[in-house]
Amino acid sequence: ATVLKISHQFPGGTATEGDFRDRLCRRFAELVSERSKGTLSAEIYPGSSLMKTNAQFSAMRKGALDMSLIPISYAGGDLPELNIGLMPGLVTSYEEGLAWKTRPIGQELTKFLAAKGVVIVTWIWQAGGAACRSRPLVDVADAKGVKVRGGSREMDLVLQAAGASVLSLPSNELYAAMQTGACDAALTSSTSLTSFRLEELAKHLTSGRARSYWFMLEPLVMSKAAFDRLSAEERDIIVAVGAELEEFGRSAAMQDDVRVAKVYEAAGATVHDLDDRLVQAWRALARDTAWKDYANKNENCARLIKLAMEVGS
Amino acid sequence: MSAHGVDLGHPVVVTAARPGSLTARIVSAMAVLNRTIIVFCSIALIAASAILSYSVAARYFFNAATYWQDEAAVFLLVGSTFMSTAFVQSNRGHIGIEALTGYLTRRGNAIRTFLVDLISLLFCSFFAWKSWTLLHEAWVDGQVSGSTWAPPLWIPYSLMATGMTLMTLQIALQLASQVDGWRSK
Amino acid sequence: MSTLAVGMMYGGATLAIMASGMPIALALGTVAVIFMYFFMPAASLDTVTQNVYEELASITLLAIPLFILKGAAIGKSKAGQDLYSAMHVWMSRIPGGLGIANVFACALFAAMAGSSPATCSAIGSAGIPEMRKRGYSGGFAAGVIAAGGTLGILLPPSITMILYAVAAEQSLGRLFLAGIGPGLLLVVLFATYAVMKFKAEYAAAQRAYAADPAQHPILSQERYTMAMRFGALPRVMPFIVLLSGVMIALYGGYATPSETAGLGGILALALIALIYGVWRPTDLGPILESTLKESTMLMLIIGMSLLYSYVMSYLHISQGAAQAIVAMQLSRWLLLAAILVLVVVLGFFLPPVSIILMTAPIVLPPLKATGFDLIWFGVVMTIVMEMGLIHPPVGLNIFVIRNIAPDIPLRDVIWGTLPFVLLMAFAVVLLCLMPSISTWLPNLVMGLPSR
Ligand code: NA
Ligand code: NA
């Protein structure tokens, strides 16, 4: 029997309760073990309890870790191409994001990852938003003078172009920094907006429940070395289960977008929704800053962003 | 010092190399090198503090973006940690639990220290070797840190690799000194 | 091989190799690599250095050397002596006054630093020599500082509480507030013990004096006039300026927690340069060198212990033990007791950060299901992990003390810290009987918890 080790950085729970990204891993483990009649099973290490977030991707490439559910852009330092997984304004809806899988962009990305030793098992996209301590961060103009944690190089470039003062801050210091006012606002995924309990500090939430310019690709991925070690039937099971969970991932992510807004409202914050005009404004700014910066990195990046734009609105 | 109790951090047998021997000359050269490195590590420590303080001031007075300061401080501090580790080892400053010291004879303790140093040497050689391969990968792939600033990773990796190599060398010298000391008896 | 067997081998091998006297950092690394070779995929060996680097390369952890620098700047310059002589002038009438002052100083420093060894080092580098100069026994002085240092992770900000809050999906603000009451409780307990222990040592010195009239420093009776007392006050100023400067930067929202560490370092160096003229390279050299010695020793242990805990996690040892406890279906309080015992045992080998990451996901759901308040449990678990910091074999605070005062035999250090371990256990019992010690403040400030 093969035991797959799945590592992720999100809070741990059970198959029915807790962070949906952890629940998705647990469902995957159950389904795989059921279909393989126990020859395949999985052990889940939530909350970075096995290794640091940044070590996961390279451990998978080397075959030291079997699987992970990870924001793909976290490996953007090693492989700049992967920053496309968190490119502001590039994807503006779940449909667009999930369409990648069957479109040329998805096939290119899959091929690229396979060459680097990683297989995408489940495509998962997640919208995000901004939690703000004093004044809202909705339109581009709102960013002027705000001390904000963008959370990624690409988002920081956009925010800086909009006049914000970006600051780097480890995610575990975010709460303390928002509490004291060292940081005014933070952009992150809907689920993380509540798992860091920022609702206790925020007066405003820019929600991703209606529209968003912030979409992150955080797939369930597998080490190609581990994948190739399996029998043909086992590989089929992994692929099939992975694809089935995509619907779960999408609906759970969308539920979180709604739930987060409710949690912030209940905590007394004002919730702001985005409309098409606002999304397009951010997208236009991103195109001139972050997209350009990305495309200039290398030929691969230039080709990937071109393919991704074909999917876009 | 208690003869029978457990004790920490005081290897009883610290054999110095025979004066004038090749080992002794390398030992003193290494001491000079370590001293020099410590000066740079001290500067790195102050620089890290200064950079983080500058970050606070720049944000407060100029509302400036502060996306590189944390990481610059990390590089300086990781670098000074690894680079000064050989110096710390040269004074036997990496603390251990000397639980057996009181129970062994002088000769027994000499053998124990020898074995401990030998295993330490093996581990540090392994770690140094893997640090160089990590550095090589980062260099070839052009890896950068995943942050907004995105500095190249060969900078901290090279400091880790160099530091652990010096540490390995330091332990090897301490072993050689012991062997030297025995032979001269 | 069963997880239990692997776990026993892992623990046994660690104890054996540590007993040999090998440096702790290298011992942890060696055990980890050997088990990696035998029980993990071959590729794991290629990830060793990256794992250690990723663990260390966090500004939250690397704030430790900067906090040590701040402590060394005060402690190794005349600033520390002045501070302590001023405190002595004011508190000499109170038995154990200097011990109490040290406990308070630890608590104040803990409110700036998120880590216990940093607190221990900062206050201890001046505190231990000063207490011993005034006749406190080595073990007593070491115990006060080792125990006082543990407040670093109980009083906000705290590295371990941040991790716990995320793992337990609890409010960090609430958790920070919940640590304050028990932190003050420990301050009172430690201070009370300091008075009692001082009286005992004083009495012993008197008896010795009666038998053989050699003056013991603890017996020296100094009388200070009010004029002398107020004259001593300005000497406390550098410390007060430093403390308030850093506190304002942190709590006023000017600096992030890790920036605070750098700011404190620079501020401390600036103060000793201005007031004591300590600015020449020859003056600064010893301060920086001792900072490097201590922080390098400590950071290498922390880095390697994270490698050690990676292997332990991969082999599912802590998780297996936690799952076994959960599977026993114990009653409410027995479950809590079993989990706390597990935390104590893990505390033999692991630093608090690793204990939380490995056990929290498994023990928290059943604790929640049996009706324990997870904020309250976070505080209890923190105190229990603090106990691990001051008992061997891996007790980071003890290593710090060894570095500050290498001439105090380990046996004395252990006997000196033991009463404080017991006081912490007593505090845990009090917290179980009266959870409100911890929960009243967060409930007062933030209202009753919603979920
Ligand atoms: Na603290
Ligand atoms: Na311990």
Image (tube, coloured by chain):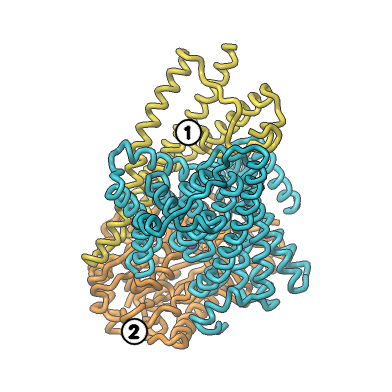
Chain colours: A orange, B yellow, C cyan
**In this figure, which residue is indicated by the disc labeled 1?**
B167
> Mark 2 — residue?
A274
Mark 2 falls within which chain?
Answer: A
For the residue pair B137 and B16, the one nearer the viewer reads as: B16
Q: Is residue C137 left or right of residue C247?
A: right
Residue B140 coordinates in the image, percent (x, y): 37, 43
For badge 1, the amino acid type reads: Met
The chain under label 1 reads: B
Q: Quadrant of residue C341?
A: bottom right
Q: Nearer the viewer, mark 1 or mark 2?
A: 1
Q: Quadrant of residue C257?
A: bottom left
Residue C70: x and y in percent read 39, 51
Left or right position of A287 against C45: left
Q: Position of residue A299 (x, y in %)?
A: 30, 55
Question: Quadrant of residue A107 in the image?
Answer: bottom left
Question: Which residue appears at 71% of the width and 50% of the height?
Answer: C7
Say what amino acid the circle numbered 2 marks.
Leu
Instruction: Measuring from the top left, give residue B20's x and y in whole percent.
Output: 45, 13
